[in-house]
Amino acid sequence: EDLKTAKPVYVFVMDVTGDFAVKSESRCQIEYNVPRVDSKYYYRNSTFQFPSDGTVLLTIPHLHSGGNWATVTRKATGERVCFGGALYGNGTEAGNEKGFVVGIEQCTTPFDVKAHEEFELRVQYSPVGGLALNQTSHVGVMGYVWMAIAKATER
């Protein structure tokens, strides 16, 4: 019975290495390296626009070890619509490995978006630890979010 009222959900992925607000072609690389820098944190951000009006129902950030958090902010107002903090393990058993990301907070509060409205994805990584490869602290990290969206015309 519930299936008769179900509406489609679309997945939108925003990668911090791309910038959809600037170019029609994305420069997404998915992975990037965190350089060793003389500051406590290393930030990377990207601006993106939604292709149509809708409601974001769920936002799930993705980070690797060394990552602290990811945020999604509405550019026009500065409203933070999602904050996903990394959860690190502190044990030796599977799923709780000390020093590794074992979970990331998900954002389950829905928010409405308009076509071409700008949002910023920002991630924070630690520039210490990780691999000592040249001047890089963490190799092949990621910073993206995926969002489940119900289009306004299909709600």
Image (cartoon, helix red, strand yellow):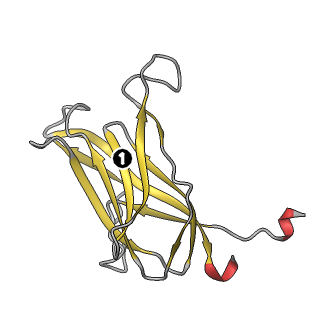
Quadrant of the snapshot with the N terminus: bottom right
- Kindly identify the residue that appears in the image at 45 percent across and 18 percent down: 91
Q: Residues within 10 Å of mark 1 (few under 14, many from 20)?
A: many
Corner quadrant of residue 90: top left
Q: Quadrant of the C terminus?
A: bottom right
The residue under label 1 is which amino acid type? Trp
Residue 85 image offset from top left, x and y in percent: 40, 44
Residue at the spot of label 1 = 69
Residue farthest toward the left in the current orientation of the protein: 38
Residue 10 in the image: above or below residue 16:
below
Image quarter for residue 79? bottom left
Relative side of 15 to 57, left or right: left
As drawn, 37 above or below 72 = above
Image point (25%, 47%), residue name: 33
80 left or right, relative to 110: left
Residue drawn at the location 53% of the way across and 61% of the way down = 147
